[in-house]
Image (cartoon, grey):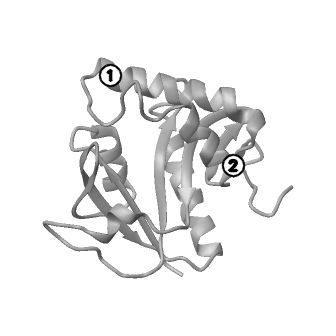
Amino acid sequence: MHKEEVVLAMEYVFRKATIADFNDIMTIIEDAKKQMLQEGKEQWNDAYPNREHIEADIKETYAYVLQHNGKLLTYGAVMFTEEPAYNHIHDGQWLSSLPYVVLHRFAVSKQARGQGIGALFMQNVEQLSRDKNIYSFKADTNYDNERMLHMFDKMGFTYCGKISYPQGERMAFEKLLNK
């Protein structure tokens, strides 16, 4: 087992993704994009996220997965680097100016939706952050992404304001993690 690989209940494994996971990750991403588009959501589209984003996540070691009995259930880009868009928050303010972890391109496989798998992934991101002595978890989502908004509420995140990307404005959240 690798240092950043966590075994949960002997069946779930949270780990860094490898290039061998690429096709399974893309299936999760494409299914999530398809669902968002069908529901009229505006956050993801045919161009984002794409193969290049996921390849870059894997290459930069941002890519993490949660698997159950060898099957990938969840994907997310977990970054311990500064998110430039977070430097300019408006209509609010961050809870802290601490170093932080950020989660991007988060998706749960269609087979695992509604089973608490997303929360399990995020709990593992929190533990990984604590292990790195990082006690702030920041993330953002579109105003119409009800699933992610519900997840932030369920996981104890606080709405902090709005941030902007070239493709639009996003709602920004932060959670301070216990040591």
Q: x and y percent of residue 47 in the render?
A: 41, 29
Residue at image position (53%, 67%) is 81
Q: x and y percent of residue 110 in the render?
A: 50, 24
| Mark 1 Cα shell of 10 Å, populated few (<14), some (14-19), many (≥20) | some
Q: Which of marks 1 and 2 is nearer the N terminus?
A: 1
Amino acid, disc 2:
Lys
Q: Nearer the viewer, residue 18 or 121?
A: 18
Q: Closer to the camera: disc 1 or disc 2?
A: 2
Q: Viewed as shown, does residue 53 lie left or right of 85?
A: right
Q: Residue pushed farthest right? A: 1
Q: Nearer the viewer, residue 1 or 12?
A: 1
Amino acid, disc 1:
Leu
Q: Which of 40 and 152 is in front in this view?
A: 40
Give the image quarter of residue 24: top right
Judge whether 42 appears above or below 116 on screen: above
Q: Distance between the residues labelled 1 and 2?
A: 28 Å
Kindly check if marks 1 and 2 are in contact, taking CB atoms under 8 A apart as contact: no
Residue at image position (51%, 32%) is 50
Viewer can see residue 170: yes
Which disc, if any, is residue 37?
1
Judge whether 147 appears above or below 155 on screen: above
Viewer can see residue 116: no
| Mark 2 Cα shell of 10 Å, populated few (<14), some (14-19), many (≥20) | few
Q: Residue pushed farthest top? A: 38
Residue at image position (54%, 46%) is 76
Give the image quarter of residue 52: top right
Which disc, if any, is residue 59?
2
Give the image quarter of residue 18: top right
Q: What element carries label 2?
A: helix
Q: Is mark 1 on a helix, strand or loop?
A: helix
Q: Viewed as shown, does residue 36 lie left or right of 64?
A: left
Q: x and y percent of residue 66 in the render?
A: 64, 43
